[in-house]
């Protein structure tokens, strides 16, 4: 099936099997491997991207469902070599270790602040419940999101 | 340069890549030209926990679309290979006659796409004679059914067979005023690195190239070579970015060792990546001990005897898990306490479950959990405060090596200060007052306070040392080669700090090379919290030796005595003392060294022994006495890992460790049904801890340098887990202590807590 969508600001056309997931399309067809796959039950959130401005676990959506949509992945966040404030906050607060959950975590975190620009620590923790990390104990991820909210 | 960079909070240089385009993990190698045209491997796995294989029918699978080849163990001529520590335990990489756990690989399928392989795996028909599944370690120990028949028992490793003394029973506690016994479960958990296992292979000029998600490329190279009948020099393992390991990616697995052979059969490069469901069944698990504890002492709080018999669940293979109890748990059985008499026997038992491997702490968390639980039980029995009982029994501060009665020698220790720091930071007295208030008010939500004091072993696994090479490029940069292997720890930043400190070369001009066995042929990988004290120290020393070599070259060029040459680290240039205007840069010296093979040095740095970090944790929980739900409110962690290289990285390691420890105490457990089917085989069913269950973690710093290495550093990768697990468990029990509850097994789920409250098992 033909699909066309805007990915990180660029129009991309593709031809996919109907069962192709958005995450597979982004990774395997478009070569945007920053978005990771960490589970097969939509539990971990490593594949979180933005579709029309909202965070979506891209393993829960077919590529064809994203036809005509505006998709942003981790590769599309930095502008002109300048990191997004959330990316900077993760770096400054050591919000990542092995990096595997990081792209999804950053995309989810941006959505949290979009919905609630000044969240409490608890708001952030509940907001990130669908994104799993095994390295950081979440401590510095939560700190990063709160720091980004302030900046 | 204003002083030393060491000890500073330096941000990670690896982060921009991870944050902007993501890491390059093994499944991301889409543009690797050596893998062009690669096919995909899928393993069909056992759906039965224990059974003899009558027949394997692959014909339907082979006729599915896109299937290139299907192989059974017989097709490949595989034979059972003996386990390292007990040759009577033997299995083939693909199960042929017998299956021993759900998830054991049986058939390898090669397909054009990954999805085709998954579909075909569903079509493999295996006919079994089903045998009784022994998933319970205590049942397996006494069962007449033997999972490896030739062993004549499911107990495959025992400290008594190693010549260590057996336990002597109750007679050991003669003269004790108080004796307490408890059976304690240290449950089976899943390491769950967020990146599952994956690999890719290609044959290049007769050599096997294997890209592998591993913690130890050199070890993997050797085991892959052996499995394929190759010399180590015929295998090149290349480690891309690794999305976490936690011990479970130390060795190489049968699925990985077979890939080279399969690639040869089909004449194409291959890729393999397991699914999360496969990973939960076939990546090794951790912990899995049953401990029978007896502790005895005086009514005024002195512990005089401690006895432990550990049953270590090996799972269905004699993997690293089988040796953790005898070689890691037993030596650390005394913990931080001066106990005059200790007996510890361990028995490793095969069961029909996923094999057990190293997992963050690997044998030491189990030792700490045991002695800390025993101290709590003893304290409860004599009616003494848990912190006070600990204080009474701590080994006093020591600067010279101290040997416990079980025979383990610790380097340095100052346990009481760690305990005091943690108690002070927690406002322990105020917490006890609040607890008393809630108890007298009969609040539904009771407060629990748990204290643990621990010591552990880091850098205690051979090789006792590490190789480093530092090479200066013609443009004055440094390339650092290390046998350690990052998977989140921040080696690139840490090793750059060490190199920069010695050479004055800016961090950004230092590149780290690791995990490629052609570029770094020898190395011990990253495990057992060994990296900094062995690999880091090696880099530090070798960088210093490169500076010495550079001074010799500079002396020649400047026509001066070598001892008069100084390195101005602020600008990375060498000059004669007193005449800074005439200087030679690193680049100039590298170019001038070309004739002698360049400006570089390589050396193996050996260490005299392990180090023994220690600390104290305080956990505060709230337990809902109506529902049994536990909320972790606070975690105070005082972890002393010696001199601190970078507090940013240190804190990160502690945080992650604490979360994994709290996860074991409260949530996570791998479970099987009566037939041996895993019921926690994905991240929807397994209670992986999330941000919502974790509190803010309060880290309390303490630095007691070790004399074991010149940097005075110890490991910090596992301490957080070791300290937190017993503290959190203890807090849950403490919340209900006034109701007569003395023990709740981990994980302290709402159901377990509710059952304890209602007197049910």
Image (tube, grey):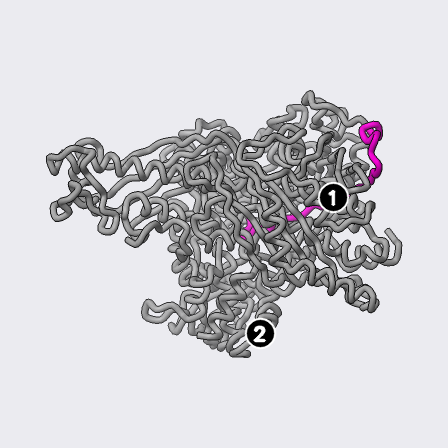
Direction from residue A3 to residue B728 in the image, left or right: right
Quarter of the figure with residue B288: top right
Query: Disc 1 versus disc 2: distance between alpha carbons?
Result: 38 Å
The reply to whether the magenta stretch includes residue A129 is no
Q: How many marks?
A: 2
Residue range highlighted in magenta? B169-196
Direction from residue A62 to residue B671 in the image, left or right: right
What residue did someone put label 1 on? Answer: B375
Q: Is residue B305 above or below residue B124?
A: above
Residue at image point 71% right, 36% down = B312
**Mark carried by residue B327:** none
Of residues A128 and B272, the one drawn nearer to the viewer in this rendering: A128
Element under label 2? loop
How packed mark 2 is, by other alpha carbons closer than 10 Å (few <14, some 14-19, many 20 or more), is few
What residue did someone put label 2 on? Answer: A120
The image position of residue B343, as x and y in percent, is 73, 30
Of residues B572 and B604, the one drawn nearer to the viewer in this rendering: B572
The image position of residue A20, as x and y in percent, is 53, 63
Work out whether residue B357 can be spotted: no
The image position of residue B189, as x and y in percent, is 67, 48
Q: Is residue A47 above or below residue B200?
A: below
Residue at image point 44% right, 27% down = B231
Of residues B472 and B433, the one drawn nearer to the viewer in this rendering: B433
Task: Give a yes or no on whether discs 1 and 2 share a subunit.
Answer: no
């Amino acid at each position: 099936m033909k699909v066309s969508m805007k990915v990180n600001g660029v129009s991309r056309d593709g031809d996919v099997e109907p069962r192709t997931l958005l995450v597979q399309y982004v990774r395997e067809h478009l070569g945007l491997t920053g978005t990771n796959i960490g589970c097969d039950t939509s539990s971990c959130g490593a594949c979180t991207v933005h579709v029309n401005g909202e965070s979506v676990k891209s393993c829960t959506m077919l590529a064809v469902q994203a036809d005509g949509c505006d998709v942003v992945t981790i590769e599309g966040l930095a502008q002109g070599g300048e990191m997004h404030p959330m990316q900077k906050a993760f770096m400054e607060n050591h919000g990542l270790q092995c990096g595997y959950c990081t792209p999804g975590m950053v995309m989810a975190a941006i959505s949290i602040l979009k919905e609630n620009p000044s969240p409490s620590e608890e708001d952030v923790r509940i907001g990130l419940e669908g994104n799993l990390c095994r390295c950081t104990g979440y401590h510095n991820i939560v700190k990063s999101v709160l720091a980004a909210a302030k900046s | 340069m204003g002083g030393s960079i060491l000890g500073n909070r330096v941000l990670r240089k690896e982060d921009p890549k991870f944050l902007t385009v993501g890491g390059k993990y093994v499944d991301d190698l889409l543009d690797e030209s050596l893998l062009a045209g690669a096919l995909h491997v899928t393993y069909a796995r056992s759906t039965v926990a224990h059974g003899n294989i009558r027949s394997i029918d692959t014909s339907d699978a082979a006729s599915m679309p896109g299937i290139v080849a299907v192989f059974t163990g017989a097709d490949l001529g595989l034979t059972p290979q003996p386990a390292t520590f007990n040759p009577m335990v033997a299995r083939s990489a693909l199960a042929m006659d017998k299956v021993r756990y759900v998830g054991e690989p049986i058939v390898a399928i090669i397909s054009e796409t990954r999805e085709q392989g998954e579909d075909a795996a569903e079509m493999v028909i295996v006919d079994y004679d089903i045998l009784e599944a022994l998933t319970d370690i205590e049942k397996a120990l006494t069962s007449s059914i033997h999972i490896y028949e030739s062993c004549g028992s499911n107990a495959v490793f025992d400290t008594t067979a190693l010549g260590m003394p057996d336990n002597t029973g109750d007679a050991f506690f003669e003269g004790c005023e108080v004796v307490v016994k408890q059976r304690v479960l240290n449950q089976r958990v899943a390491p769950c690195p967020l990146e599952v296992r994956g690999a890719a292979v290609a044959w290049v000029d007769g050599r096997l190239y294997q890209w592998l998600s591993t913690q130890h490329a050199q070890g993997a190279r050797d085991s892959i070579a052996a499995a394929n009948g190759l010399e180590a020099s015929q295998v090149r393992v290349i480690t891309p970015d690794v999305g976490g390991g936690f011990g479970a990616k130390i060795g190489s697995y049968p699925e990985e060792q077979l890939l080279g052979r399969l690639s040869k059969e089909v004449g194409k490069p291959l890729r393999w990546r397991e699914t999360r469901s496969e990973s939960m069944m076939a990546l090794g698990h951790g912990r899995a001990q049953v401990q029978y504890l007896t502790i005895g002492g005086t009514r005024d709080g002195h512990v005089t005897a401690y006895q432990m018999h550990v049953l270590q669940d090996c799972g269905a293979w004699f993997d690293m898990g089988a040796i953790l109890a005898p070689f890691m748990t037993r030596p650390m059985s005394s913990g931080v306490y001066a106990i005059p008499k200790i007996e510890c026997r361990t028995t490793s038992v095969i069961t029909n479950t996923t094999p057990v491997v190293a997992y963050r702490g690997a044998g030491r968390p189990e030792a700490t959990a045991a002695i800390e639980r025993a101290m709590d039980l003893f304290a409860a029995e004599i009616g003494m405060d848990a912190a006070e009982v600990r204080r009474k029994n701590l080994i006093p501060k020591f600067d010279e090596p101290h040997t416990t009665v079980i025979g383990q020698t610790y380097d340095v220790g100052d346990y009481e200060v760690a305990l005091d720091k943690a108690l002070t930071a927690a406002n322990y007295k105020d917490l006890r007052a609040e607890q008393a208030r809630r108890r007298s008010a009969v609040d539904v939500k009771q407060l629990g306070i748990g204290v643990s004091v621990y010591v552990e072993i880091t850098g205690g696994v051979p090789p006792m040392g590490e190789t480093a090479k530092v090479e200066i490029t013609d443009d004055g940069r440094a390339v650092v080669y290390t046998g350690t292997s990052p998977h989140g720890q921040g080696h690139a930043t840490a090793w750059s700090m060490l190199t920069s400190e010695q050479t004055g070369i800016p961090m950004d001009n230092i590149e780290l090379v690791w995990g490629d066995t052609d570029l770094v042929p020898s190395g011990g990988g990253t495990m057992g919290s060994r990296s900094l004290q062995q690999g880091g120290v090696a880099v530090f020393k070798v960088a210093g030796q490169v500076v010495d070599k550079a001074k010799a070259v500079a002396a020649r060029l400047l026509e001066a005595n070598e001892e008069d040459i100084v390195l101005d680290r602020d600008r990375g240039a060498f000059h004669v003392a007193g005449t800074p205007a005439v200087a030679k840069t690193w680049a100039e010296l590298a170019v001038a060294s070309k004739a002698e093979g360049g400006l570089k040095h390589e050396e193996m740095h050996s260490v005299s022994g392990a180090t023994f970090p220690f600390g104290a944790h305080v956990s505060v929980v709230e337990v809902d006495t109506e529902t049994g739900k536990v909320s972790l409110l606070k975690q105070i962690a005082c972890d002393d890992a010696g001199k601190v290289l970078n507090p940013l990285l240190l804190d990160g390691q502690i945080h992650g460790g604490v979360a994994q420890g709290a996860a074991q105490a409260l949530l996570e457990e791998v479970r099987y049904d009566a037939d041996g089917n895993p019921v926690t085989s994905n991240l929807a069913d397994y209670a992986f801890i999330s941000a919502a269950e974790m509190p803010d973690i309060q880290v309390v710093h303490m630095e007691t340098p070790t004399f074991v290495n010149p940097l005075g550093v110890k490991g910090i990768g596992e301490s957080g887990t070791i300290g937190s697990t017993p503290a959190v468990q203890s807090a849950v029990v403490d919340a209900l202590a006034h109701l007569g509850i003395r023990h709740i097994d981990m994980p302290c789920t709402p159901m377990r807590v509710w059952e304890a409250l209602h007197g049910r098992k």
